[in-house]
């Protein structure tokens, strides 16, 4: 089945769909965040259910550390981490230029100066992350997804952990097996609303 045009745009470098912003209030963060979303960026006009499961029920960041939001979209994960851990450095990465612009603007609008928004190739290769949070782009295709995850997992610190949220109907269990077989021990931390939160650690 062909994906709707807007859905397929969110992992494009330059979305072709016309911009149409909507503001979302993220109430599970204190104080709440106000985020502008846009067409051509993942989860336009809402907070995706999987992302909400990850942020409501998944692990909280330590007060200080270097964290990665992989596939940041409009920035709900990055900004939540930054608000919960004001002493941290949060790097927000996305191939989508519209997403990066939104995330940077949202961080500024919410007064979060500890968010750094970058294209993947602009991240200093020497940087290592204490933790990664991601609602990964499953629809980009299995081969591309595997390459993406292995690239960034390799940039965890020795005792770092990646927290991934994936819907069970989009292959969470098979992804867990594949990561483990690829040498990255992966456990299911929780299940909620059809989503799994997977924790991935270094061998």
Image (cartoon, grey):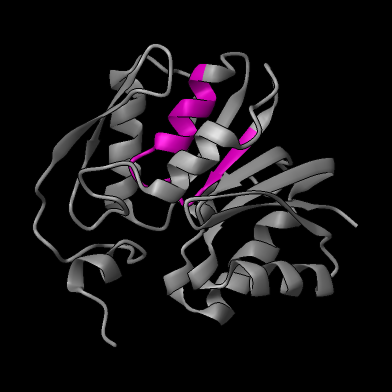
- Up the image or down, 194 lies above or below 32; here it is below
Is residue 114 among what the camera can see?
no
Residue at image coords 32%, 54%: 42
**From the viewer's perspective, is residue 178 above or below residue 39?**
below
Q: Farthest residue to the bottom: give it.
A: 1
Q: Nearer the viewer, residue 97 or 81?
A: 81
Is 68 within the magenta?
yes
Left or right: residue 165 compared with residue 100:
right
Tell whether 108 sits left or right of 94: left
Q: Quadrant of the N terminus?
A: bottom left
Residue 102 pos. (x, y %): 28, 39
Q: Position of residue 179 (x, y in %)?
A: 75, 68
Q: Position of residue 107 (x, y in %)?
A: 36, 25
Q: Quadrant of the C terminus?
A: bottom right
How many marks can you see? Answer: 0
Q: Quadrant of residue 27?
A: top left
Tell me the residue at 26%/42% (across/down). Answer: 46
Q: Is residue 103 left or right of residue 45?
A: right
What residue is at 66 percent from the left and 75 percent from the top?
A: 174
Question: Is 139 or 187 nearer to us in this picture?
Answer: 187
Residue 72 can be seen in this image: yes
Start-end of magenta stretch: 67-83
Q: Residue at x 63, y 27 (%)?
A: 60
């Amino acid at each position: 089945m062909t994906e709707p045009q807007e859905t397929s745009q969110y992992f494009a470098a330059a979305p072709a769909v016309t911009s149409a912003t909507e503001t979302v209030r993220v109430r599970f963060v204190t104080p709440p965040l106000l985020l502008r979303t846009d067409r051509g960026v993942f989860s336009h006009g809402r907070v995706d259910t999987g992302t909400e499961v990850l942020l409501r029920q998944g692990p909280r960041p330590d007060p200080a550390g270097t964290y990665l939001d992989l596939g940041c979209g409009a920035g709900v994960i990055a900004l939540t981490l930054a608000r919960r851990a004001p002493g941290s450095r949060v790097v927000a990465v996305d191939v989508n230029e519209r997403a990066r612009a939104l995330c940077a603007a949202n961080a500024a609008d919410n007064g979060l100066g500890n968010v750094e928004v970058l294209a993947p190739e602009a991240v200093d290769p020497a940087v290592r992350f204490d933790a990664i949070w991601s609602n990964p782009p499953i629809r980009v295709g299995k081969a591309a997804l595997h390459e993406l995850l292995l690239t960034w997992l390799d940039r965890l610190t020795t005792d770092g952990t990646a927290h991934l949220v994936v819907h069970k109907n989009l292959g969470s269990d098979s992804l867990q097996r594949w990561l483990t077989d690829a040498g990255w021990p992966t456990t299911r931390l929780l299940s909620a609303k059809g989503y799994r939160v997977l924790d991935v650690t270094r061998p």
